[in-house]
Image: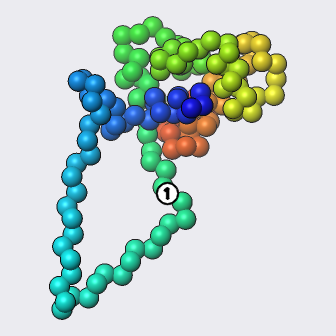
Amino acid sequence: MSIFSKIMDAISWKGTRPTQTGQTPKPAPTATPAAPSPSTPAPAPAPTATAAPVSQFDVEANLAEMAQGKDLNWRSSIVDLMKLLGIDSSLANRKELAQELGYTGALDGSAEMNIWLHKATMRKLAQNGGKVPAAMLD
Protein backbone atom coordinates (compact mmCIF):
# COMPACT_ATOMS: atom_id res chain seq x y z
CA MET A 1 0.00 0.00 0.00
CA SER A 2 1.35 3.41 -0.92
CA ILE A 3 2.14 6.00 1.73
CA PHE A 4 -0.58 8.30 0.36
CA SER A 5 -3.11 5.43 0.48
CA LYS A 6 -2.26 4.93 4.15
CA ILE A 7 -2.78 8.65 4.79
CA MET A 8 -6.06 8.64 2.87
CA ASP A 9 -7.35 5.57 4.69
CA ALA A 10 -6.43 6.97 8.10
CA ILE A 11 -8.16 10.31 7.50
CA SER A 12 -11.25 9.20 5.61
CA TRP A 13 -12.31 6.67 8.28
CA LYS A 14 -15.58 8.45 9.04
CA GLY A 15 -18.25 5.80 9.47
CA THR A 16 -15.86 2.87 9.19
CA ARG A 17 -13.44 3.46 12.05
CA PRO A 18 -13.05 0.47 14.38
CA THR A 19 -15.19 0.64 17.49
CA GLN A 20 -13.87 0.70 21.04
CA THR A 21 -13.79 -3.10 21.00
CA GLY A 22 -11.59 -3.08 17.90
CA GLN A 23 -14.29 -4.37 15.56
CA THR A 24 -15.33 -2.52 12.45
CA PRO A 25 -19.00 -1.57 12.63
CA LYS A 26 -21.22 -3.50 10.27
CA PRO A 27 -23.35 -1.54 7.83
CA ALA A 28 -27.03 -1.27 8.69
CA PRO A 29 -29.10 -3.94 6.97
CA THR A 30 -30.99 -2.77 3.93
CA ALA A 31 -34.47 -3.84 3.05
CA THR A 32 -34.74 -6.22 0.13
CA PRO A 33 -37.33 -4.94 -2.34
CA ALA A 34 -40.24 -7.27 -2.94
CA ALA A 35 -40.51 -8.84 -6.37
CA PRO A 36 -43.04 -7.03 -8.56
CA SER A 37 -46.40 -8.72 -8.86
CA PRO A 38 -47.52 -9.84 -12.32
CA SER A 39 -49.92 -6.87 -12.56
CA THR A 40 -47.22 -4.35 -11.62
CA PRO A 41 -44.78 -3.39 -14.38
CA ALA A 42 -41.15 -3.92 -13.49
CA PRO A 43 -39.26 -0.69 -12.80
CA ALA A 44 -36.88 0.50 -15.49
CA PRO A 45 -33.25 -0.23 -14.70
CA ALA A 46 -31.38 2.69 -13.20
CA PRO A 47 -28.92 4.41 -15.51
CA THR A 48 -25.35 3.45 -14.84
CA ALA A 49 -22.80 6.09 -14.02
CA THR A 50 -19.43 6.12 -15.71
CA ALA A 51 -17.62 6.71 -12.44
CA ALA A 52 -18.60 6.08 -8.86
CA PRO A 53 -19.17 9.30 -6.91
CA VAL A 54 -16.39 10.24 -4.55
CA SER A 55 -17.53 10.14 -0.95
CA GLN A 56 -16.85 13.34 0.95
CA PHE A 57 -15.00 13.51 4.24
CA ASP A 58 -13.92 16.48 6.34
CA VAL A 59 -10.14 16.31 6.56
CA GLU A 60 -9.72 19.07 9.13
CA ALA A 61 -12.53 17.84 11.40
CA ASN A 62 -11.30 14.24 11.33
CA LEU A 63 -7.70 15.28 12.03
CA ALA A 64 -8.73 17.71 14.79
CA GLU A 65 -10.69 14.92 16.47
CA MET A 66 -7.72 12.56 16.22
CA ALA A 67 -5.34 15.24 17.55
CA GLN A 68 -7.25 15.97 20.76
CA GLY A 69 -4.80 15.92 23.66
CA LYS A 70 -1.76 15.66 21.36
CA ASP A 71 0.83 18.38 20.83
CA LEU A 72 1.34 18.03 17.06
CA ASN A 73 1.50 20.70 14.37
CA TRP A 74 -0.38 18.57 11.80
CA ARG A 75 -1.89 21.61 10.04
CA SER A 76 1.46 22.50 8.47
CA SER A 77 3.97 19.73 9.25
CA ILE A 78 4.05 16.54 7.17
CA VAL A 79 6.07 14.83 9.91
CA ASP A 80 3.49 15.67 12.58
CA LEU A 81 0.64 14.75 10.23
CA MET A 82 2.16 11.31 9.65
CA LYS A 83 2.81 10.85 13.37
CA LEU A 84 -0.81 11.75 14.14
CA LEU A 85 -1.97 9.10 11.68
CA GLY A 86 0.36 6.44 13.09
CA ILE A 87 2.44 6.34 9.90
CA ASP A 88 6.24 6.14 10.04
CA SER A 89 7.47 9.69 9.33
CA SER A 90 11.03 8.65 8.54
CA LEU A 91 12.93 10.31 5.71
CA ALA A 92 12.64 7.08 3.71
CA ASN A 93 8.83 7.20 3.91
CA ARG A 94 8.74 10.92 3.14
CA LYS A 95 10.96 10.29 0.10
CA GLU A 96 8.56 7.57 -1.04
CA LEU A 97 5.57 9.91 -0.55
CA ALA A 98 7.40 12.67 -2.46
CA GLN A 99 7.95 10.32 -5.39
CA GLU A 100 4.30 9.19 -5.31
CA LEU A 101 3.11 12.80 -5.43
CA GLY A 102 5.56 13.91 -8.14
CA TYR A 103 8.09 15.99 -6.22
CA THR A 104 10.98 16.95 -8.51
CA GLY A 105 13.33 18.58 -6.01
CA ALA A 106 16.08 17.02 -3.94
CA LEU A 107 14.83 14.17 -1.74
CA ASP A 108 16.81 15.40 1.25
CA GLY A 109 14.18 16.03 3.90
CA SER A 110 14.66 19.78 3.65
CA ALA A 111 12.07 22.26 4.87
CA GLU A 112 11.26 22.96 1.20
CA MET A 113 10.53 19.29 0.55
CA ASN A 114 8.48 18.87 3.72
CA ILE A 115 6.36 22.00 3.11
CA TRP A 116 5.74 20.86 -0.49
CA LEU A 117 4.79 17.38 0.75
CA HIS A 118 2.23 18.70 3.22
CA LYS A 119 0.56 20.95 0.63
CA ALA A 120 0.65 18.24 -2.06
CA THR A 121 -0.86 15.73 0.37
CA MET A 122 -3.69 18.14 1.19
CA ARG A 123 -4.30 18.85 -2.52
CA LYS A 124 -4.41 15.11 -3.26
CA LEU A 125 -6.83 14.55 -0.37
CA ALA A 126 -9.06 17.29 -1.82
CA GLN A 127 -8.92 15.61 -5.24
CA ASN A 128 -10.04 12.37 -3.62
CA GLY A 129 -13.12 13.67 -1.84
CA GLY A 130 -11.57 15.41 1.13
CA LYS A 131 -12.93 18.73 2.32
CA VAL A 132 -9.71 20.65 2.98
CA PRO A 133 -9.56 24.31 4.15
CA ALA A 134 -8.13 26.67 1.52
CA ALA A 135 -5.39 27.73 3.94
CA MET A 136 -3.98 24.19 3.85
CA LEU A 137 -3.91 24.16 0.05
CA ASP A 138 -1.94 27.39 -0.56
Residue at point 21% right, 69% down? 33
Left or right, 57 with respect to 127, comes to left
Q: How many numbered discs sit on the rendered protein?
A: 1
Quarter of the figure with residue 30: bottom left
Residue 74 visible? The answer is no
At label 1, counting other C-alpha atoms closer than 10 Å, the crowd grade (few under 14, some 14-19, many 20 or more) is few
The percent coordinates of residue 112 (x first, y second) are: 75, 17
Identified at 26% across, 37% down, the residue is 25
Residue nearer the viewer, 116 or 93: 93
Q: Quadrant of the N terminus?
A: top right
Residue at position x 27%, y 30% in the image: 23
Choose between 131 and 4: the one closer to the eye.
4
Give the percent coordinates (x, y) of residue 73.
Answer: 52, 13
How far across and how far down the image is residue 116, in percent?
A: 70, 24
Return the residue at label 1: 52
Would you say 75 lies left or right of 105 here?
Answer: left
- Disc 1 marks which amino acid? Ala
- Left or right of 84, for residue 110: right
Q: Position of residue 28 (x, y in %)?
A: 22, 48
Q: Name the quadrant of the C terminus.
A: top right
| Above or below for 12 versus 70 | below
Q: How is the image coloured?
A: rainbow
